[in-house]
Image (cartoon, rainbow, N blue to C red):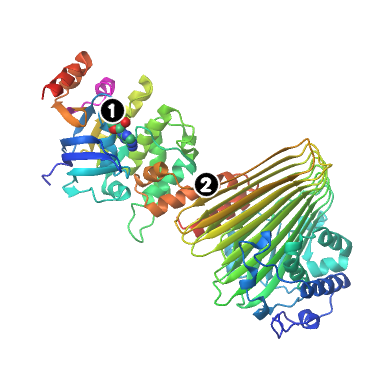
Amino acid sequence: MTAGPAESTLAAADFDTLSGGLTEPEAIAVARAAAWARFTSLPWPTKKSEEWRYTDLTKIGFEALTPVVPAPATAEALSADVREVLGRSGERAGVVVLREGRVAHLELEPEVARSGVVLSSIRDAADRHPEVLRRALLEAQPGPAEEKLWALHLALLGGGYFLYVPRGVEMPAPIHAFHVVERAGTLSSAHSFVYGESGARAAVIDEFFSDDLDAETVSLHGATITGEGGAGIDYVALQRFGRGVKRFSTQHVVAGRDSRVVTFNVALGGDLSRADVTSRLDGPGSDSEMLALWFGDSDQHFDHHTLQHHAAPHAHSDLLFKGALTDAGSSVFRGLIRVDKGAQLTDAYQTNRNLLLSERSHASALPNLEIEADDVRCSHGATIGQVEDGQLFYLMSRGLTRRQAERLLVFGFFDEVLGRLPMEGVRARVREAIEEKIGL
Amino acid sequence: MSEPLLSIRGLRAKVEGEDGEILRGVDLDLERGEVHALMGPNGSGKSTLAKVIAGHPAYEVTAGEILFEGEDVLELEPDERSRAGIFLAFQYPAEVPGVSIANFLRTAVNSRLGEGEEMDVFGFQRTLTEKMEMLKMDPGFAARYLNDGFSGGEKKRNEILQMAVLRPALGVLDETDSGLDIDALKIVASGVNRLSEADEALGVLLITHYKRILNYIRPDRVHVMMAGRIAESGGASLADKLEAEGYDWLHRAVAAV
Ligand SMILES: Nc1ncnc2c1ncn2[C@@H]1O[C@H](COP(=O)(O)OP(=O)(O)O)[C@@H](O)[C@H]1O
Ligand SMILES: [Mg+2]
């Protein structure tokens, strides 16, 4: 049986139509059924809630979308566009291609597989590693305002990949995953599951893309990223959807004792792009770096919500989100550092910087702290500014047009964040995607 | 082509939105292949003139004209003037963190290409390396962020590097010599001389405070700016007189007018 949209719209769907008549692993079936029940019982959040004040979910025609039902993995050859990107992206340990969530291609370097690393579809993982999967999904309980979308994401779960890196294994290169959306008018979902046992090292880049689509299309994404003691995980989400796509990504990091987890979100495409990124500093000495860049033009809207949740003492988190907007682009940053009572000696930083290139662009920045411990070092700050006239004139006096000069200044503005991306190959790929979007 | 490379007539300018005139009727002709020194006390308007020539938006021209190769440039944007062949080496170049010199210069060279023209990447790299050698710059310099944390001397050298790569028809060098020690001054001066040798039509307007650089770059003409006007023009020997006697005699002469 091949994957395909369910016969009905979301409004007319019930759990059976969403299952597409497929047998699926018990762990997934149970989780999906519960999620569907929750989804149908919850109201859509409105602009009255703080979390959705600047992004109006009620304007999206979810009910009219055609949900893509979970489907088994297929083994297709790599398409030309994916091969092209891979050819320019440096070394990698494996490749996953997902089409509307369904795994269409999956490969892992044999040597890496021999070291015990598992890369599979979520469905296969549910058969073989149900406990790990269940725990990670349970731990990623979002706040009340995110619950509706998260329930929908889980109800459609079945798409996505599972990366498991055993104790002490260091992956030599990243996994490059491509999330492709091809069909206009669909609602699809995919999950990125990354788990590193103690001392493991892993790196992943999730690249999301589509053509410009001529009907409203929604792509849901969830990521659960777990690092056990001393693990090191780098996770990059590069979103370059075409117009017509609205995407919602919920990412949940759990950083164990002395582990270090880096997340890097890049938003370039789509009509609307929302990411909820949570890092839970779960073990003493854990370290989480949260980075993001976005560039919005036309009437694109980007919305980033973050939570740095310090649940353990002696942990460090550092967030740097930078966005640039032109035309009537708009963005929201809403970030919270939460320090639990027992999380003494927390070191937490949160910075959001915005660069506006046009009169009509608009950025909102809402950084926040919630601290219950008394011996902590925390700082948060946000700025919204324009390019400096002196810099602009200097660049233009060398022949750069105003547009070129502005775009080069955006690059300079982004460089600080790009420079913190640990993997050279991935950095080059991200830089290239940004260049393509900015159009220097 | 009989018209001068640069011809400034009755130029008056002020800071946009403010009252006092800074340039109060400047006249100056510079022929192709000539080097003119523009001297004068602090605050007399030399940098303002340089920036007005380059099209700085902070200044408003209230009267007069600037003809470059016979064309009125006052209506041109700064980038159009640059592509037309005007180059300003800034007295205080802007710092642009995050943008490397190489990336910046590549974009600047690209901006000069016509529609559909492709840049010769290797050719660019070769030119850049060659010009950096000429200015005795460390090869790693091009990877540094534009002027970010540069010493005064590094900034000045970087300006001349850009001029060497962009090859303008007119270089306006605003106090490129100040803040340079004697070795750096010689390197920069010989760089400018090499550019003049390579392009016999290159015109240079050398703004300076000190006679020192004129020992290395021989001017064809020397002008002295006082209170927004060219108060005196002469041959190279005028610089010697200024060195020996200062500006006082000119102050008195201007006051007497
Ligand atoms: N952007 C500006 N805003 C205000 N005043 C200015 C500005 N630029 C120049 N001036 C004033 O104009 C006069 C000439 O300055 P400038 O052209 O820098 O002189 P010079 O380069 O000969 O030392 C000075 O009094 C200076 O303060
Ligand atoms: Mg000056």
Q: Position of residue B200 (x, y in %)?
A: 21, 38
Q: Taking B23 as reference, is A352 above or below it?
A: below
Q: Position of residue B5 (x, y in %)?
A: 18, 42
Label drawn at residue A243 = none
Magenta range is B209-223
Label drawn at residue A413 = 2
Q: Residue at x 66, y 78 (%)?
A: A65
Q: Position of residue B150 (x, y in %)?
A: 46, 31
Q: Is mark 1 within 8 Å of ligand 1?
A: yes
Q: Which residue type carries mark 2?
A: Phe
Q: Position of residue A43 (x, y in %)?
A: 74, 72
Q: Residue at x 79, y 38 (%)?
A: A314
Tell me the CA gap for discs 2 and 1: 34 Å
Task: Determine the secondary structure under disc 2.
Answer: helix
Answer few, some or many: residues within 10 Å of disc 1's Cα (few below 14, many 20 plus, some between 14 and 19): few
Q: How many marks?
A: 2
Q: Which residue is mark 1?
A: B43
Q: Taking B163 as reference, is A135 above or below it?
A: below
- Front-lying residue, B2 or B72: B72
Task: Determine the secondary structure under disc 1.
Answer: loop
**Mark 2 or 1: the one toward you:** 1
